[in-house]
Amino acid sequence: MKAATLEFLKQRFSAYYQSGNLLAPPSMEEREWGFIFFDPEYPEIRMRRHMGFPRKDELFTYLRTMAPAHAYYSSAYYAIPDAPTMDQKQWLGADLIFDLDADHIVRGPYDMMLARVKEETEKLLEMLIGELGVAPHTIDLVFSGGRGYHVHVRDVETRNWGSNERRELIDYVCGIGLDPVMVLGRETHSPRGWYMRFIASLQEYLLWLREMEAEARIKEVSALEGVGKVSAEELEGRIDEILKGLSGHPPVLNVRDPLVARLVKGLTRTKEGKFASLLREKAALADEPVTTDIKRLIRLPSSLHGGSGFRVTPVPVREISRFDPLVDAVVFSDRKVNVDLTMKLSMSLLGSRYDLEKGINQVPEALAVFLCCRGVAEIGGG
């Protein structure tokens, strides 16, 4: 990054921190804090951490004075948060954190990635509130400022969970390690959750099979682990029967039937392919290591993301469908700035579409900050 570009970003971030509405998390005096700055080596990451702030005014003064590129605090609570080693900090518990990052879900244009990760976030919220009984008032939803969302659950009942308990929860959310034969074998008059996700995926898979030629259908099914050609040929005459049961209210699937059991086991043992894709669409694809980490540093809501210049923005849970990060998380102006782009690209921002050529382009300041933070542009002349 050129010196002029670095100085431009430092000035813009400093201007935001001088006037922005800054926020602090609950129990901030028990949190560890960490920061990355616009130093000469940026964007090489060198974090200054093991810091503590006993009061909001001290934190806000630090932010306004230092104008960091990235600001983080610990999901954990500590007796001595500014101790120089993790062992000395004395862990007291931690918020339950879910991180949904488009990088782990889909690749493509930035606006498409943001739309896709919002879908995953909405699925996660529905699971937490509708299935797992998490009270909405204990959930803080935050746009990360980059390519996703953070979900903070601040509930005293989960605060002291270790990594193993958190692993069980994230496995459920992501559909990892669930035994479909066991799940489907439980009789219920009000099916929901993964029972219905397995049912819906199997129904879609069988409808997809039914559209094939018989030879292709048998080849597809016989390739499943533990199924084979004989069972695939037997399924030929029973697809409609199984589909009829799946479309009932409640749906019926007899997993004690040897053919059905072999089919279900074969489908769930096959990690790739049509059924795996259908089932994966119904999970909430959160980043597992983040949830299991009981000492995680997470971005500070109201800070700026040094990889985009966007605000790390709290979002009311009920308003996520209306939230547009390319409008609502933008804090910089529309004054014109020249940038020197390293490539041709198209970008949506603040309701407008920008089709930019490689080389010098005149763009709104907000877009200039984004492009420079992303490392695809330098401040241009003129």
Image (cartoon, grey):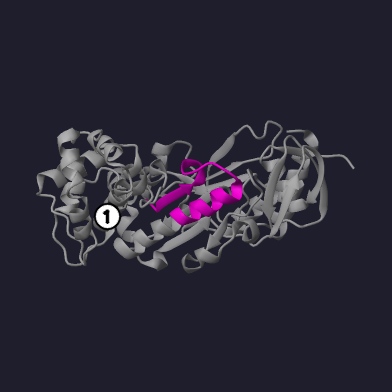
Residue depicted at x 27% and y 49%: 206
User: In the visual, does 231 lie left or right of 220?
Assistant: left
**Does 7 appear above or below 244?**
above
Element under label 1? helix
Locate residue 163, reporting x and y percent: 32, 43
Judge by depth and name the residue closer to the eye, 217 or 81. 217
Lateral position of residue 53 relative to residue 78, left or right: right
**Is 307 in the magenta?**
no
Nearest the viewer among 163 and 249 is 249
Asked if 191 appears above or below 161 in the picture, the reply is below
Tag 1: amino acid:
Trp
Residue interval drawn in magenta: 94-120
Position of the N terminus by quadrant: top right
Q: Report the residue marked by disc 1.
A: 194
- Is 97 magenta? The answer is yes
Q: Is residue 230 shown to the viewer in this render?
A: yes
Residue 53 visible in the picture: no
Is the residue marked by circle 1 packed among few (<14), some (14-19), or many (20+) residues within 10 Å?
many
Look at the image and tell me in which quarter the C terminus lies: top right
Q: Is residue 325 left or right of residue 17?
A: left
Residue drawn at the location 30% of the way across and 47% of the way down: 175
Residue ranking furthest to the right: 382
Which residue is drawn at the image coordinates 53% and 54% (left, top)? 115
The x and y percentages for residue 217 are 28, 40
